Image (tube, rainbow, N blue to C red):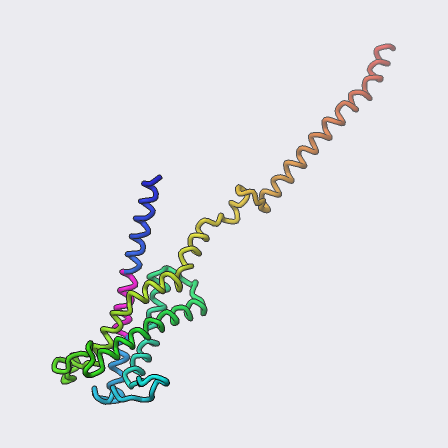
Amino acid sequence: MSSNGDLRTGRLNRGFLIEFVKFGLVGGSGVIVNLAVVVVLQKLTGMNDHQVREALFQLWPTSKSVRVYHLFAMAAFVVANVWNFEINRFWTFGGENRASRKRLLRFFAVGLVAQLFGLFIMTLLMTPGSLFGLPRDVFDGSTGLRRPLYWAQLIQVLCTTPISFVLQKLWTFASLGSDSDASESEPAPQDRGTTGQPTKDSAALVSTHADAAAAAGEGQLTAPATSASSSPATTSSTAG
């Protein structure tokens, strides 16, 4: 009994690990999409590192402000989440065509929670003088590989991926496995006769047996009557 339980636990752990690896690979492709959107927006607007840190409006009632790089990150979040949702739906969690608008909204809700946490990390990295701020002598923006915007975006995505995986697995795609198990365990229509639920074929078979039994019963009833009616004639012929 315990060996079966250990085997089942091992399979679940292995399946969970495989899903996490798949989710990480999909997330890796999503990181590329995410960063590509940020780079394209930065190139299209022509903003430098100082301009992307400009405040757009203040978050009342706090003293914090929404900055340009926050908008870049949110735009990248939307595009990358659509990308990740479709690939995770088909490949990571094996949902095939079971995705619905409700599931998509769940995916975005989970992603939004992770994104808000990521924006907090990104703000710490992009703020000069912050304890976790990227060192400006290294990330001075002189080249693409030394732009603090790109590195801050990359770091915040990597930090939020494990959180997103757990929430997506436990909530967004939680019913996919149970749905597939239920469909596999459900008997086919032609086999339901063995489960106590008669089908059309089994009902016709029962009706045929009933007709045959009724015909046999009628034959047994008419046979004695025929023999009884013929016995007087036989007696009279004998007597004559």
Using the image as rendered, state which of residue 50 and residue 238 is in the foreground: 50
Residue 10 makes an appearance in the image: yes
Using the image as rendered, state which of residue 8 and residue 196 is in the foreground: 8
Residue 82 makes an appearance in the image: no
> For the point 42% across and 67% down, which residue is it?
103
Q: What stretch is highlighted in magenta?
A: 21-33
Using the image as rendered, state which of residue 181 and residue 157 is in the foreground: 157
Residue sticking out furthest to the top: 239
> For the point 35% across and 72% down, which residue is it?
113
Answer left or right for 207 relative to 28: right
Residue sticking out furthest to the left: 137
Q: Where is residue 111 in the image (x, y as percent from the top left)?
A: 35, 71
Quarter of the image with the C terminus in it: top right
Magenta region includes residue 172: no
Q: Quadrant of residue 16?
A: bottom left
Quarter of the image with the N terminus in it: top left
Magenta region includes residue 23: yes
